[in-house]
Amino acid sequence: MLRTYIKYLQKTQLSTGYSLIELMAASLLTLMVVGVSGFALVTILRETEVANATGQIQTNANRAADFISEEIRNADRIETSLATADLQTNAPTYYSTHGSNRNKIPVLALKIPSVPERVVYYLQPAGNNSIWRPPYVLRRFGPGFKLDGDYDRTQLNPQEWDGDALIDGISDTVTNTACLNPGRTRLPSANADVKGFFVCVQPDGQLAEVHLTTTSQNEIGHLASNNATSRYNQKMNYTVETLAYAKADYSGASGLSFPDYALYDYGIVPEDSGNVSATLSILAGLTCNTSVSPGNSFSAGDTVTFSVDCIGISPVSSNTNDVVYITDGDNISDIDTNNSSLLETQLNSYLDGDTFSLQDNEILYLLDLDPNDGNAYHDDAYVLITINP
C-alpha cells in the first residue's frame, strides 16, 4: 500500500508546472499583446490630438471667413490699392498708428457708408510671448458692433479703434498665391507680404476673392515629417476660399447717388462735395429759424452742422445735450421724451411701426429747445437734413 502511494506521488510531481519553453512562449505572446495595445493607444491619442487641432482651425477659419465676407457685403467699395498715399488719404488714422510698422501688413480696406475711415484688415506676427497662436494674427481696425450686428455709433471715432484680433494661427506661407481670376488685383501686391490671408479685388472694387489659410503647426508640428505629402503635413493647414460682393446700396429717394458721409455727434463729414438742405419743424409752438454751416454746399471733408435760433434759445447739432440724430432703422423707443405718443404722432410720416424709415441720404435731428428744464427730452422740434449730389 505504501509503495503504491509513493509511486502516485512521483507521477503527480512529474506532471505539475510549465516547462521553460512554455514560459518563454507565454512571455513572448504577452509582450506582443502589450506592444500592440500600447501602439494602438499611442495611435489613438495621436489621432485625437490631430482631430482636435484640425477641427479647431477649421471652425475658426470658417467663422472668420464668414465674418469678413459679411462685412464686405456691408461695404459699397473694396479698395484696390493699399499704397502709402492711398492709406494716408483713406485711412489716415490707421496709417498714423500702423502704417510705418512693417511688421503689420495691410490686406483689405473697406469703404463702408457712415464709417468715417476705411475698415482695415491687417496681419501682425503673433510674437514669442503672445497669447495668440503663431505665426500671424489677423486684426481688424474698425468700429465695434451692437448686439444686433449693426455698427455701434458710439465707436465711430477712429482714434479709439484698437485693431482687435479676429483670428490667430494664420499661416506664414501658402502654396498658391495666384488669384482665381487673373484680372483681379491681389493684395498685398508684394510677394514677400503674401501670407495666409490675402484678397483679390475686381477692378471696380465690387467683388473680392478671400483666401484664408490657418495652420495647426503650433499644436501638431512635432508630428510633421520632411515629406510634404505625409498625412500629418497635409492635415496641418486648412484653406478657405470664397467670393464676397460689396453690395451696400445707398441712394436717395430720387434714385441719384449722393456723397457718402460719416455721422459723428459733432456733425456730418461727407467724402465728396455736394449740397445739403435743412427742413425745420417746430413742435413746441415757438418761432424758430435754422441755418447750416458751412452753407448749402460743401466740399469733401467739411464738417456739416446746423444751428437753430428760437428767440434766444439756440441748440446746435454738435451739442448732444440739445440734439440727438436718427437714421434709418432706429427705434422711437430709444428717444428720451415725456410724451412718446405725441412724438410718435408728430413723426408718423417717418415711422414704420416703431422703426424710423428714412432715405439713406436723410438724417433726422430731434431737439430739446428748453435746456434749462433739466429733463433733456428731445421732443420739441426736429430738423430733417438731406444730403444731395
Image: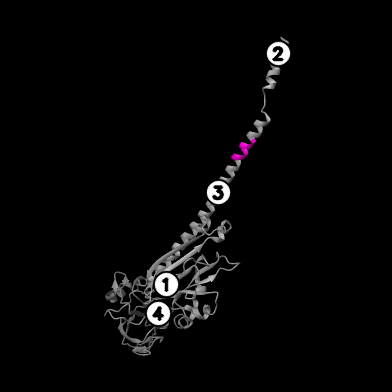
- Dot 1, crowdedness within 10 Å: few (<14), some or many (≥20)? many
Q: Secondary structure at mark 4?
A: strand
Q: Position of residue 23 (x, y in %)?
A: 66, 32
Q: Which residue is mark 4?
A: 263
Q: Disc 3 marks which amino acid?
A: Thr
Q: Is residue 250 above or below residue 220?
A: below
Q: Which residue is mark 1?
A: 200
Q: Secondary structure at mark 3?
A: helix
Q: Earlier in the sequence, mark 3 or mark 4?
A: 3
Q: Disc 4 marks which amino acid?
A: Leu
Q: CA distance from mark 4 to mark 2?
A: 113 Å
Q: Position of residue 75 (x, y in %)?
A: 38, 74
Residue 306 placement, left or right of 217: left
The dominant secondary structure in magenta is helix
Q: Secondary structure at mark 2?
A: helix
Q: Which residues, given as a range, are shown in magenta?
A: 27-33
Q: Which residue is mark 3?
A: 43
Residue 127 colored in magenta in the image = no
Q: Secondary structure at mark 1?
A: strand
Residue 234 placement, left or right of 76: right
The reply to whether residue 106 is in sight is yes
Q: CA distance from mark 1 to mark 3?
A: 41 Å
- Dot 4, crowdedness within 10 Å: few (<14), some or many (≥20)? many
Quarter residue 129 falls in = bottom right
Q: Which residue is mark 2?
A: 5
Quarter residue 112 falls in = bottom left
Q: CA distance from mark 3 to mark 2?
A: 58 Å
Q: Disc 1 marks which amino acid?
A: Cys
The quarter of the rendered structure image containing the N terminus is top right
Q: Disc 2 marks which amino acid?
A: Tyr
Q: Earlier in the sequence, mark 1 or mark 2?
A: 2
Q: CA distance from mark 3 to mark 4?
A: 59 Å
